[in-house]
Amino acid sequence: MKAKDQDQVPRHVAIIMDGNGRWAQQRGWPRLKGHERGVQSVETILHACKRFGIPYLTLYAFSTENWVRPPLEIAGLMRILARFLKNRLADMRKEQVRLRAIGRLDDLPRPARHELQRVIKATEQFNQRQLILALSYGSRDEITQAVRSIARQVLSGQLAIKDIDEALVARHLFAPDLPDPDLLIRTGGEMRLSNFLLWQASYTELYITETLWPDFGEEAFIEALKAYASRRRRFGQIG
């Protein structure tokens, strides 16, 4: 695939970055080593998105369910997140990449939340390329919060029940201005969405690979793009 084939390139790619722990365990290393190595794959895919002109990349970095993991692993993940944000800020400003985040961001520990807010603020003027991190994110939680917000408007008389439609619900999600993902990649071979973008991914093309996230490089990403380019997106139509 060539970078010039824009008509076959997804506008928005979402990725479930699975397999860091397994990658490390296969080598007899602590699970955090896999998470640290996974940061390199994030860097690689960011560069690939620039090369192929993909303006939106959403990464499932930490789910609401991940809080049940061992405290030491969670603490390590948050340190890795804060370090990644700190180290990437200069490059993101140079490349004019806007950082955004979706999820229950107040759940994050203060150091990680501070770095996140700092980078979001420092890059908020950029719009041509966006990196969206899903942090303490769960799609059911996102939809539930949207329903509560709509219900409050109905109870206050600001909104009539007959005015509730899909577009209204979408406007109450965490990032309503983002286009729905065209392609959702899951590494690590598991065949499920794991509570990720359930509303937004209704017509998203899915690509599952056995490759573990730390091994997911540009060649593997190109294979996913090729698979996407070979599909016909009918959106319920005959063709």
Image: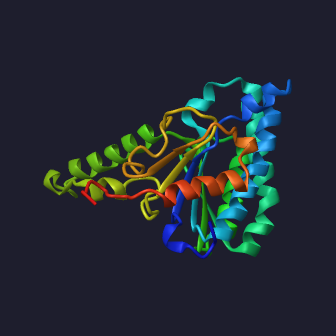
Q: Residue 64 location, x and y as percent? A: 55, 35
Against 150, residue 23 (above or below) is above
Q: Is residue 190 left or right of residue 33?
A: left
Across the whole image, how many numbered discs are drawn on residues?
Answer: 0
Image color mode = rainbow
Point 43% across, 52% down: residue: 204
**Residue 144 versus residue 218: which sits nearer the camera?**
218
Q: Residue 37 location, x and y as percent? A: 81, 43
- For the N terminus, the image quarter is bottom right
Residue reaching furthest to the left: 162
User: Where on the picture, by quarter, is residue 23?
Assistant: top right
Residue 103 seen: yes
Against 16, residue 121 (above or below) is below
Q: Is residue 181 left or right of residue 190?
A: left
Residue 111 seen: no
Against 193, residue 5 (above or below) is below
**Residue 29 versus residue 117: which sits nearer the camera?**
29
- For the C terminus, the image quarter is bottom left
Q: Residue 29 location, x and y as percent? A: 86, 27
Q: Residue 197 location, x and y as percent? A: 46, 46
User: Where on the picture, by quarter, is residue 5?
Assistant: bottom right
Point 37% across, 40% down: residue: 144
User: Where on the picture, by quarter, is residue 44?
Assistant: bottom right
Point 32% across, 44% down: residue: 147
**Residue 57 versus residue 205: which sits nearer the camera?**
205
